[in-house]
Image (tube, helix red, strand yellow):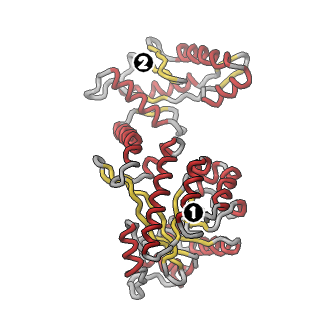
Amino acid sequence: MNDYTLQAGEAVQGSNFVKTCIVESVAHLINKCPDKTLLYSHSKNVYLAIVKDIHYENDIMALKQLIKQLKSPININGVEYLPCPKIGFVSRYIEGNENAKELIRFATSALIQIRGTRHPYIAYNEKEDNLLQKKFKLMSDLPRALKNSEEIRLYFQPIIDSKSEQCIELECLLRWKHPELGNISPFSIISWIEETPLMQDLTLRVIDLAIEAAQVLSTENMFPKIAVNLSCYDLYFDKIHDKLKLATLAMSSGQLIAEITETALIKDLDTIAIGLKNLRDLGINIHIDDFGVGQSSLSYLTKLPAHSIKLDQSFLRQIEADPANLKISAGITTIAKELGFDVIIEGVECAKDYQITQYIQPSCIQGYHIAKPMPISKVVHWLKCNQFKQEKDVKGYLTMTTII
C-alpha cells in the first residue's frame, strides 16, 4: 500500500488505520506468498520474503504470479484497497554471494532502483548497485568538498550578443574534482540532494564563488552579467535569499542573473512565480533555462517575472534531424520576443549551428563554438584578447535555401 493511501487514511480515520493496514497487509502477504515463504518486516511498508524451492530459471514466472496475487484487493474497515506491490529480488545463486546480509542488501538495492518506475519487479543489477554506492559516497563527501577550494570550483561559459558578437554574460558551471574519483559532474547527484540541506549548502557555495569571480572581473574593469543556476527548492530558503541579496550588493547593478529550469516550474508554477518575484525585487533578472524540455508552452511564461528564455540545445539537434523544425524554432523565438523576452539559444557547437542561428535570430548565443567553459583567469584573458571570432570561410555551411 502506498504512502499516500496511508497518510490519507490516517488523516480521515486516525492512527489506528495505519495499524490496521499493517496487520491486514501482513496477512495479505502471508496468504498470497508461496508455501514455505519466510516473511520479515524490513522497514516502513517494506517486507523481506525468503521464498524457498524456486529455481533460478523459474524466478520471473514465480514473480509474475506473485505480483498477480498481491494485486488482489485488501478489505480494511469495509473499504477495498488495491495494493500496488513492487518487488526487488535477488537469487541466492549469484556466484560468490552466499552471504545472507549481502543478499538482503542486494534485494534492497533492487527495490530502490524500481521506485519511481512503473515496473512491478526488477532483478538486482550489479552495475546499478555500484552506481548507487558511488552516489552515496559522493553525497557523503560533498560537505567536505564544499569547504575545499581545490575540489569545488566554478567554470564560466561566455554568452554573446547575436548582433554585436560581444560577450555580455557568463554562465556559472560547477566543477567537482574528487580526490579519488576524479572529475565529477554535479548534475549526476543533483537529483539526489535537491530536496536535502546539501542543496542549500551547494547553492550558497556557488553564490560565494560567483561573487569572487565578479570581483576579479571588476578589477579588470569588466562587468559581464553572471548567471547562477538555482533549484526551485532554493527559492524557499531565507539563507539563499539573504546570500543573493548580498551578491547584488557586491556586484554591479543588474549584474546577477538567476537561472531556473523549465521542468522545475511545472512542479508548482504559482508558488515558484512568487519566489521569482522576490528575486526580481532584489534586482536579479531571471532566465528560464532548458526551454523546450518540459511543457514548451509560451502561455505560462506570461505568469512569470522572467527576463529571458534559453532555448534548449535539443532545438538545434531537431533541426539537424528535420530542417522543417527550423521554422518552429524561429517562430518560438519571434513570439517570445513579442512577449518581451530575450531569447538565448544554447548548444551552438559548430559553424553550421551558428549559421542556423542567423535565421532563428535569437538575442544571444551560447555554446562550444563561441567558447568552452573556463576558469575565471582564462575568462579574463579571453575577454581581453580573443572574444568570439566567427570564421567566415568554414566549409560545410548549410545554405539558407537548403535548411528552410
The mark closer to the camera, 2 or 1, is 1
Q: Which mark is residue 214?
A: none
Left or right, 239 with reference to 388 = right
Tell me, yes or no, if residue 178 can be seen here.
yes
Q: Residue 53 location, x and y as percent?
A: 38, 16
Q: Which mark is residue 51?
A: 2
The amino acid at mark 1 is Thr
At 64% from the left edge and 67% from the top edge, which residue is drawn?
307
At 60% from the left edge and 48% from the top edge, which residue is drawn?
238
Report, in whole angstroms, how far the alpha carbon at label 2 lies from the one at label 1. 61 Å
Compared with residue 329, is residue 63 higher up or lower down, i.e. above or below?
above
Left or right, 24 with reference to 175 = right
Q: Which residue is mark 1?
A: 248
Instruction: Please tell me which residue lies in front, 60 or 398.
Output: 398
The amino acid at mark 2 is Val
- First in sequence: mark 2 vs mark 1: 2
Q: Residue 184 location, x and y as percent?
A: 36, 52
